């Protein structure tokens, strides 16, 4: 069966990869082959992400570019970009829950403020882009089966339309043990991405690009020894 995979990049990152750096060097095409059934003929992987900001981590954009270069070595993968926004905003402050019985329990300054100004980071557009391409590809009859890696319930209606009104098989490749009930209710099937799938779907530590003109390596911080 002709199969397209749609990857909500930030959802996958925050659900499975953020706290497991040893799996960040992930070959998503290989992951899809690992999780899908043998009769799924993988034609394309659409990966939806946004270029990250250096506001919080100045090295993050460089690491991301290395990873995007690695993804470019797979003919099955196509990357689609939304936007990564960093804004300053006011937020209500939750004071620490200090035990008054302890001598050092006093807050560092008084009076405690009710609000603070913070940096707010958010990714915009990937869910809309994913839904749009899913619907467009289904309309053009590009696949028999679509598999979506996400736990974002905002994609429920797009999945329902493609399944019920366009007659396609649409599954969820879940990055969480208990996926959204609205997603599972709309989908044709659910498969779970497990740690062993991540472990067996890593790029080689060193990848040669541009016919040998450039070599990239797994970022040093993407190892099991880094928390």
Image: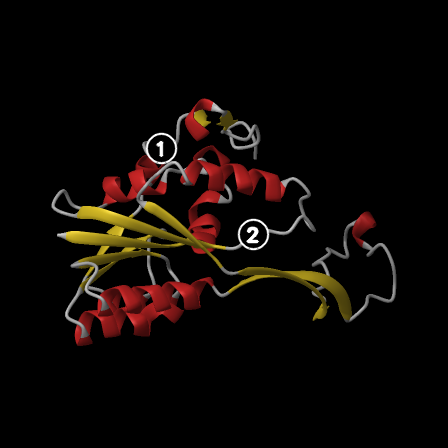
Residue at 11 percent of width and 46 percent of height: 39
Q: From the viewer's perspective, is residue 22 above or below residue 101?
A: above
Residue at 49 percent of width and 24 percent of height: 213
Q: Would residue 13 appear left or right of 175 to someone viewing this image?
A: right
Q: Position of residue 15 (x, y in %)?
A: 44, 51
Q: From the viewer's perspective, is residue 2 above or below residue 114?
A: above
Of marks 1 and 2, the one in the foreground:
2
Mark 1 highlights which residue?
199
Residue at 51 percent of width and 26 percent of height: 214
Instruction: Out of 60 and 17, give the one closest to the viewer.
Output: 60
Disc 1/disc 2 C-alpha distance (Å): 25 Å
Q: Position of residue 199 (x, y in %)?
A: 36, 33
The secondary element bearing badge 1 is classed as helix
Instruction: Out of 63 and 139, give the one closest to the viewer.
Output: 139
Q: Residue 123's quadrant in the figure? A: bottom right
Q: Position of residue 67 (x, y in %)?
A: 49, 39
Q: Position of residue 50 (x, y in %)?
A: 52, 55
Query: Is residue 20 at all visible to an observer of this figure?
Result: no
Quadrant of the rendering where the C terminus is positioned: top right
- The structure's colour scheme is secondary structure
Instruction: Out of 120 and 109, give the one closest to the viewer.
Output: 120
Q: Residue 128's quadrant in the figure? A: bottom left
Q: Would residue 104 appear left or right of 15 to someone viewing this image?
A: right
Q: From the viewer's perspective, is residue 197 above or below residue 188?
A: above
Q: Would residue 98 appear left or right of 31 to someone viewing this image?
A: right
Q: Residue 148's quadrant in the figure? A: bottom left
- Label 1, residues with CA under 10 Å away: few <14, some 14-19, many ≥20: some
Mark 2 highlights which residue?
51
């Amino acid at each position: 069966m002709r199969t397209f995979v749609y990857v909500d990049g930030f959802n996958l990152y925050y659900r499975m990869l953020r706290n497991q750096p040893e799996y960040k060097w992930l070959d998503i095409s290989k992951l899809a082959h690992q999780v899908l059934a043998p009769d799924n003929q993988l034609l394309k992987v659409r990966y939806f992400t946004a270029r990250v900001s250096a506001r919080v981590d100045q090295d993050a954009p460089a690491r991301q570019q290395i990873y995007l270069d690695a993804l470019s070595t797979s003919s099955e993968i196509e990357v689609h970009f939304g936007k990564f926004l960093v804004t300053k905003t006011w937020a209500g402050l939750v004071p620490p829950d200090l035990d008054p019985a302890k001598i050092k329990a006093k807050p560092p300054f008084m009076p405690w403020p009710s609000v603070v100004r913070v940096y707010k980071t958010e990714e915009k557009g990937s869910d809309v882009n994913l839904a749009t391409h899913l619907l467009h590809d289904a309309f053009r009859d590009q696949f028999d089966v679509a598999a979506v890696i996400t736990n974002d319930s905002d994609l429920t209606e797009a999945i329902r339309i493609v399944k019920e009104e366009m007659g396609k098989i649409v599954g969820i490749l879940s990055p969480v043990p208990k996926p959204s009930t609205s997603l599972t209710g709309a989908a044709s099937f659910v498969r779970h991405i497990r740690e062993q799938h991540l472990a067996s779907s890593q790029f080689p530590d060193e990848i040669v690009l541009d016919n040998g003109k450039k070599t990239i390596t797994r970022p040093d911080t993407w190892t099991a020894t880094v928390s």
